[in-house]
């Protein structure tokens, strides 16, 4: 994605960071101000280098590169910027190639330019950087061109965009840019204080890689005139050591005028104190005098120049005081002010120190040292200090108004064991200190299984303890880009361990530990050893419960499957235990990932609802939706077919309701998992989000804790607007790719993908009419949604088995059926692109399906979306992708996007209507429809849950599974109740 430059010209409140838009610099390409790219001779897009302010004329200036053509050297053009409109006005053109520039307080212009050194072959090398001075008419001053040298007397290169600025208070000159010496060293963002009369470094600050400062402005204070006294130095303010209301001030008088000349006389020094109600910082001398009062005028003479002076304020504000020291060359002529702050009287407490948390029995002992000084280095009374303590996670206040420097948190013993930190603040009558955080400590009651210790966030990863046996410096740590716990390993090095949070086991019981791992690189061997121990360290990891000595994978990165290990352990005694694993014996460089462990007790009879898989991220309220319920036999005995049932349940009104059930269930052998297709009808008249979960009902079950799956929050769509998902087409070997169904890279891009007839064997809808399709994605952007214009979808039945040529095998769109055209939106993060087809497509189950998706409109010049694809190792090329030029830029690929399909549901007919339906509500046996006659109608199941409502419709054909329903209609004759039997 090309950055087209500055977003806008704004005015900025430097106190708050709030800005006011003056000109949108991207309002139409012809008016954009481009930073990084420009065209020869194009002044519609001046390549802005720097912006500065001239205090003499009050104008804002910018400098920009300009190059007439490729045979002409680039020059610099200087413009003024209208502060009210943001419009540019040309001022002059210089042959120098300006990188950064600024004006001193007298209007002289300072510029930073490259120093080019000629070679014998006529070429030039960039060999340094100049600092040059121009007068206030923008003419160069003779003898004022210096090569900038660092403290090692090396030439430097000021790369990229930066800024040059004077501190008008002091006359100091600062340069910020990506700067490197000419010896080939790396460039870093640096802030350099330069001698304006030589170009030499006075001081330098280097920032971490990745930082770049492209603008610099320094607020300043002024004197009455340039010949007035410069500022005082070495200012100190010392509050009374016993908390009484007095402040001792000291300072060193100046020896220079504001302009930098020798100061030859001094009449007095004025001391101003900021008013108590003035709550904003002073950004100018005018701000100072408007918001402060002169509390002292200390007489002085020329003999006091450069010498120390003192004054005591015996009536300061009780609290924070800001003083301004103003030297006066002659009486009443204000020099440059400078300030210092001090708390008089009793101060707010400073922070407690040495705050340490340790386990003490079942509680946590907290100890700390009291602050010695106030937050503002003022006086505090130790006897008046009190402390508040908060426990995290959860931000739970565990103690307030603690008088000493120790406390024990005994309430933690009642909580599930995890890792905690504590924060403490000191307080007195004046206020609270800044919070201080303790070390991390593991405490609380360890849980009994079933328990899960996932690693899907940084907070969860922090609960684990990582350590190593071989000191290669690599430890397992949270890897946010993959949502896993990871470690980098090298060939023949690394012996990396990790231990879980604590849990409790009961003597004589057997437990199953399911842990999950993955790696990045194919063919690299590892040993993965699993342990159970009594402490999270080497000494405690004594019992190995499983090991694979030759773990490796075939593919790269996410294409490698997550491997799950099931290990059993019988507890020798009641107590606290830890699960641990060791990664070792590496045959090459690799990255190992860990995804967590589940711990469950082993029973004779234990059937677990492992998961509820719902296609896509939505279901349709009041309609038949399909899903998959995953059931695992954790017990030692076989569970016979039909001896249990599974349910889909929806959380409603604080409880939950059965929305679907399967009683004809398959056999499940010990340790095995079965997938059970199910249908369910969600409740929901209006679009919204609800939680759904699976439940297994088994009379012999000995572990009710795992009879329900984790709830999933699913969007429920309104009935009639969308077709429920029927199936998800994939081979299970999935990864992410940017091309399919369209990359949004160019202004014309897309793909064609094949789905063979065997892909549709799971279609149990009873229909071959495709009404809805969808794709799964993860965006590479995090902020605003991405609107995508003009997306078109075509479909056709075909005998094509694979693509062998991207150009030659492309199927012309005119030979297919257009089923969708419109605009779509891709939302940040993980999501689903759903398209309800404009024209339903009749799929021929004896053929393959070809889907063509194209996007025509503004592209991103990058790949903003990673789509979920499959067929990484398939025998056939399933897809062709393209972007402009479409005629030639087509490429065949094995991958095809995972496809969500919604087939038209087979509508169940109403076979019987019971009750008095005279007058309005009745059943039409010929059409199989319910006649409503325009009445307001609500349809309920026998549990009383509302499934659908209609208003003003003459007749409907509800899609209902077999069962009994109640229709309530409000008519002119009153309320009617009709019982409907669906078979």
Image (cartoon, rainbow, N blue to C red):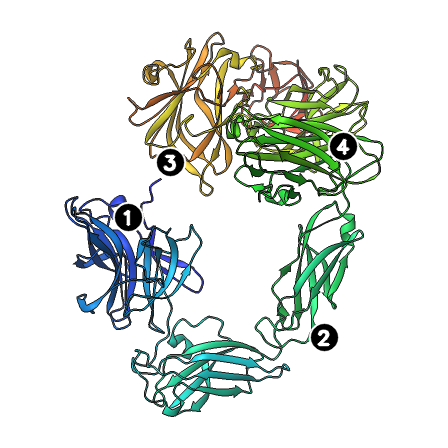
> Is 285 drawn above or below residue 327 in the view shown?
above
Indicate the secondary structure of the residue bearing disc 4.
Answer: helix
Q: Quadrant of residue 459?
A: top right
- Quadrant (top left, top right, bottom left, bottom right) of the C terminus: top right
Mark sitting earlier along the chain (4/3): 4
Point 31% across, 54% down: residue: 182
> With 838 as the anchor, is 55 left or right in this view?
left
Spatial CA distance of label 4 from label 3 is 48 Å
> With 978 as the anchor, is 120 left or right in this view?
left
Indicate the secondary structure of the residue bearing disc 3.
Answer: loop
- Percent from the top left, x then y, of residue 650? 66, 31
> With 438 as the anchor, is 926 left or right in this view?
left
Mark sitting earlier along the chain (2/1): 1
> Is 260 drawn above or below residue 543 in the view shown?
below
Q: Which mark is residue 383?
A: 2
Residue that carries the numbered disc 4 in the rendered image: 705
Spatial CA distance of label 3 from label 1 is 19 Å
Q: Which mark is residue 34?
A: 1
Q: Which mark is residue 862?
A: 3
Is residue 849 visible in the rendered image? The answer is yes
In front of the other: 805 or 547: 547
Q: Nearer the viewer, mark 2 or mark 4?
A: 2
């Amino acid at each position: 994605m090309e950055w087209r430059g500055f977003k806008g010209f704004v005015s900025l409140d430097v106190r708050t960071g709030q800005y006011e838009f003056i000109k949108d610099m991207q309002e139409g390409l012809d008016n954009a101000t481009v930073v990084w790219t420009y065209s020869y001779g194009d002044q519609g897009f001046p390549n802005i280098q720097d912006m500065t302010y001239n205090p003499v004329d009050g104008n804002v200036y910018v400098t920009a590169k300009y190059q007439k053509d490729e045979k002409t050297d680039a020059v610099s053009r200087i413009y003024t910027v209208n502060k009210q409109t943001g419009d540019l006005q040309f001022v002059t053109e210089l042959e120098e190639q300006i990188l950064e520039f600024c004006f001193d307080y007298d209007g002289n212009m300072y510029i930073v330019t490259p120093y080019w050194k000629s070679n014998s072959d006529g070429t030039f090398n960039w060999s340094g950087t100049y600092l040059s001075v121009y007068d206030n008419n923008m003419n160069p001053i003779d003898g004022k061109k210096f090569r900038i040298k660092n403290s090692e007397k090396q030439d430097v290169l000021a790369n990229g965009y930066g800024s040059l600025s004077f501190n008008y208070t002091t006359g100091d000159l600062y340069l910020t840019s990506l700067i490197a010496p000419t010896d080939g060293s790396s460039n870093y963002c640096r802030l350099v204080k330069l001698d304006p009369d030589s170009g030499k470094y006075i001081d330098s600050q280097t920032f971490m890689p990745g930082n770049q400062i492209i603008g610099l402005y320094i607020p300043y204070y002024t004197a009455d005139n340039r010949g007035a006294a410069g500022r005082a130095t070495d200012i100190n303010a010392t509050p009374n050591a016993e908390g009484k209301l007095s402040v001792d001030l000291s300072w060193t008088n100046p020896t220079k005028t504001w302009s930098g000349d020798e100061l030859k006389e001094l009449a007095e020094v004025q001391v101003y104190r900021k008013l108590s109600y003035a709550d904003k910082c002073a950004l100018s001398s005018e701000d100072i005098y408007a918001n402060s009062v002169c509390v002292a005028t200390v007489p002085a003479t020329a003999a006091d120049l450069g010498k120390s002076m003192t004054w005591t304020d015996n009536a300061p504000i009780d609290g924070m005081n800001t003083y301004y020291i103003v030297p006066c060359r002659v009486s009443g002529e204000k020099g440059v002010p400078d300030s210092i702050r001090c708390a008089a009287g009793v101060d707010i407490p400073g922070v407690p120190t040495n705050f340490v948390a340790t386990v003490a029995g079942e509680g946590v002992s907290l100890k700390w040292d009291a602050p010695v000084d106030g937050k503002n280095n003022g006086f505090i009374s130790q006897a008046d200090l009190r402390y508040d303590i908060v426990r995290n996670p959860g931000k739970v206040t565990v103690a307030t108004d603690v008088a000493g420097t120790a406390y024990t948190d005994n309430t933690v013993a009642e909580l599930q064991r995890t890792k905690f930190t504590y924060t403490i603040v000191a307080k007195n009558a004046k206020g609270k200190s800044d919070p201080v955080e303790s070390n991390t400590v593991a405490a609380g009651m360890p849980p009994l299984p079933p328990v899960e210790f996932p690693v899907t966030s940084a907070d969860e990863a922090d609960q684990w303890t990582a350590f190593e046996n071989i000191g290669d410096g690599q430890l397992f740590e949270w890897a946010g880009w993959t949502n896993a716990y990871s470690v980098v390993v090298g060939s023949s090095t690394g012996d990396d361990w990790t231990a879980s949070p604590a849990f409790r086991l009961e003597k004589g019981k057997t437990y199953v530990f399911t842990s999950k791992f993955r790696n990045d690189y194919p063919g690299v061997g590892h040993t993965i050893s699993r342990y159970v121990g009594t402490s999270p360290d080497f000494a405690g990891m004594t019992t190995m419960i499983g090991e694979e000595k030759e773990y490796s994978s075939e593919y790269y990165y996410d294409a490698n499957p997550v491997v799950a290990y099931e290990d059993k352990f019988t507890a020798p005694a009641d107590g606290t235990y830890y699960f641990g694993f060791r990664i070792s014996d590496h045959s090459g460089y690799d990255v190992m990932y860990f995804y967590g462990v589940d711990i469950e007790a082993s029973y004779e009879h234990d059937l677990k609802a492992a998961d509820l898989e719902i296609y896509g991220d939505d279901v349709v309220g009041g309609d038949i939706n399909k899903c998959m319920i995953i059931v695992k036999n954790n017990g030692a005995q076989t569970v016979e077919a039909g001896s249990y049932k599974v349910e889909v349940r929806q959380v409603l009104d604080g409880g939950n309701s059965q929305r679907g059930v399967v009683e004809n269930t398959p056999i499940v052998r010990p340790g095995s998992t079965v997938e059970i297709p199910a249908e369910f009808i969600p409740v929901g008249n209006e679009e919204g989000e609800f939680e759904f979960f699976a439940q297994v009902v088994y009379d012999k079950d000995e572990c009710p804790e795992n009879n329900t799956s984790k709830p999933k929050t699913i969007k429920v769509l309104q009935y009639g607007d969308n077709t429920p998902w029927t199936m998800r087409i994939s081979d299970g070997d999935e990864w992410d790719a940017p091309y399919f169904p369209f990359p949004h890279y160019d202004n014309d891009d897309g793909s064609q993908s094949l789905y063979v007839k065997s892909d549709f064997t799971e279609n149990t809808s009873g229909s071959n009419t495709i009404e809805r399709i969808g794709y799964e994605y993860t965006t590479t952007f995090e902020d605003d949604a991405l609107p995508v214009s003009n997306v078109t979808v075509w479909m056709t039945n075909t005998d094509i088995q694979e693509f062998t040529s991207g150009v030659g095998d492309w199927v012309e769109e005119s030979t297919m059926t257009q089923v969708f055209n419109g605009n779509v939106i891709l939302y940040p993060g993980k999501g689903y692109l759903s398209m309800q087809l404009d024209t339903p497509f009749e799929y021929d189950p004896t053929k393959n399906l070809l889907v063509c998706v194209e996007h025509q409109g503004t592209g991103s010049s990058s790949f903003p979306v990673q789509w979920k694809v499959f067929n990484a190792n398939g025998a056939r090329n399933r897809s062709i992708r393209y972007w402009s030029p479409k005629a030639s830029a087509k490429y065949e690929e094995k991958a095809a996007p995972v496809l969500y399909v919604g087939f038209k549901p087979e509508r169940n007919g109403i076979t019987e209507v019971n009750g008095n339906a005279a007058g309005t509500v009745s059943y039409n046996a010929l059409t199989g429809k319910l006649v409503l006659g325009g009445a307001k109608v609500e349809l309920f199941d026998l549990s009383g849950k509302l499934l659908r409502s209609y208003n003003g419709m003459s007749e409907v054909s509800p899609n209902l599974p077999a069962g009994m329903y109640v229709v309530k209609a409000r008519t002119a004759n009153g309320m009617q109740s009709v019982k409907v039997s669906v078979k």
